[in-house]
Amino acid sequence: MCLRQLANYRDHASGFRDAGFDLAALAVDEPVRSEAVRRENKLPFPILCDTRREVIEAWGIINHKEKGGIAEPAIFVLDRSRRVLFGSVDGEFSRVGAAALLEALRNHSSGANSPAPRRHFIIATLGDYWRAARGVMRFGVRSSR
């Protein structure tokens, strides 16, 4: 999970709620680890746990090269009938930001025709590396399966 990206969506969670959308994150981590991440980062949405990697495999977003298989960074917006309204499988250093996605969803809801939200470039900071190292110290390294 990219904590910076989760924090970006945390900061816009009320906007998504006001627009009629719920947020959830998906991780291959164990529930204890996901809940610790959720609490530590004050995320107002759940982190769903796909420890057997069934969902990320079915959705075609599994990265087999890392840690026994993790999810590629991705954003999916589903309507109430579970139809994908928007999907973006992102790169390690470029992601669709919460503000851009929220604006596109508001335009879509109002019937306005707008382009898909653009990705923005992400540069890892020392803080990102520190949080990753702290997570490894607290929870260990995932074993490959």
Image (cartoon, rainbow, N blue to C red):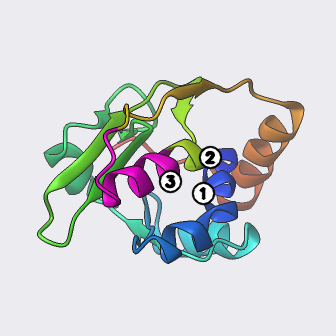
Q: Toward the viewer: 17 or 42?
A: 17
Q: Secondary structure at mark 1?
A: helix
* Distance between the alpha carbons at the discs numbered 2 and 3: 14 Å
**Left or right, residue 60 beside residue 28:** left
Which residue appears at 47% of the width and 24% of the height? 91
Observer-nearest of 112 and 36: 112
Q: State the residue position of label 2.
A: 5
Residue 33 in sight in this render: no
Task: Pinpoint residue 60: horizontal percent, then vertical percent.
Answer: 20, 37
Residue that mark 1 sits on:
9
- Answer whether residue 109 is magenta in the image: yes
Q: Nearer the viewer, mark 1 or mark 3?
A: 3
Residue type, numbered disc 1: Tyr
Residue name at image x 45 percent, y 68 percent = 23
Q: Residue at x 40, y 75 (%)?
A: 20
The span shown in magenta is 101-113
What's the residue type where badge 3 is placed?
Leu
Q: Is residue 3 left or right of residue 70?
A: right
**Tag 3 or tag 2, which sits nearer the N-term?**
2
Real-space CA distance between mark 1 and mark 2, rounded to the nearest whole angstrom: 6 Å
Give the secondary structure at mark 3.
Answer: helix
**137 or 106, which is in the foreground?**
106
Name the residue tied to disc 3.
102
Mark sitting earlier along the chain (1/3): 1
